[in-house]
Image (cartoon, rainbow, N blue to C red):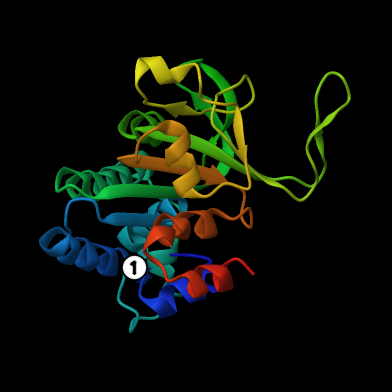
Amino acid sequence: MNGTDSIQSYIDSGAVVNLECPTFTEFDKHRLSLQQTVKPGDFVCLDTVTKMLSTTRADRQVGSNPGEPLWDPAKVNKYFGDKEYLAVYNMATQLVMRALLNLRARGAKIIVLAHEDEVTDAMAGMKMAGPQVNPAMVGELIASSSDVFRLVALTNPVVNEAGKVVFPADTRVLYLRRSDSYTAKFHVARDRSDKIPKALPNPTLPALWDTLGKVSSFLTVYAHPGAGKTTLMATATDKLLPTNTKQESKK
């Protein structure tokens, strides 16, 4: 996980367990352990998939042994002069996605956090904001997710056509409905679909699930660094935390 300073109270309370994954080897070790211990309804979060994909590709090229020197000309030349470029990207995609899908198949609720980038949206066939993963993985990640939303930390207010402020500056907004400028999706009951708002201000996951009428089975949230992805993820445990811990975490 990244950005754990913002959720230290959750970690200290035991509501969130942080599993460090500096290499793919560590990631796979934790994945194997989780597959044996995860219970239906447990939340498993990858924070961020963007970094994990990069780590997996680098480990494939330069190795994952921390005791070996990083600056080995043979390794560096291979990494930066790679003729297996597409194969390495595909390898990282398949390894990471398989780990997530295996955990979901055991009943875990998956939360994937990603940085934001301009991607080609498979549904619209056009460029728009989306999760920062390699191009071949964009469609696979979105297709595998039950819900995909965009989180934005506003630096300027959002106003409507009448000039009225809808969201003031410094508001965190979770965009639920896709537009021509960003991708999003949700799976809800048909009679609830039209009731889903365009966005949720200052979101928490319990508030999101109340809005959707369900707990997401595979939630992907993308945003620029610092927008509050990790903090949002930790609110999945809010109903499990003592009141005083919840208050401290929101200060």
Near-viewer residue (241 or 95):
241
Residue 48 position within the rendered picture, expressed as x and y whole percent measured from the top left: 45, 55
The residue positioned 48% from the left and 69% from the top of the image is: 243
Q: Which residue is located at x 83 percent, y 18 percent?
A: 161
* Residue under numbered circle 1: 23
Q: Is residue 239 left or right of residue 60?
A: right
- Between 249 and 43, which is closer to the camera in this rendering? 249
Query: Hey, which quadrant is residue 130 in on the image?
Result: top right
- Asked whether, in this view, residue 3 is left or right of residue 45, the answer is right
Q: Is residue 134 visible?
A: no
Q: Residue at x 57, y 26 (%)?
A: 197
Q: Quadrant of the N terminus?
A: bottom left
Q: From what the image shows, is residue 238 above or below residue 101?
A: below
Q: Secondary structure at mark 1?
A: loop
What is the three-letter code of the residue carrying label 1?
Thr
Q: Return the residue found at the far right.
A: 163
The outermost residue toward the left is 36
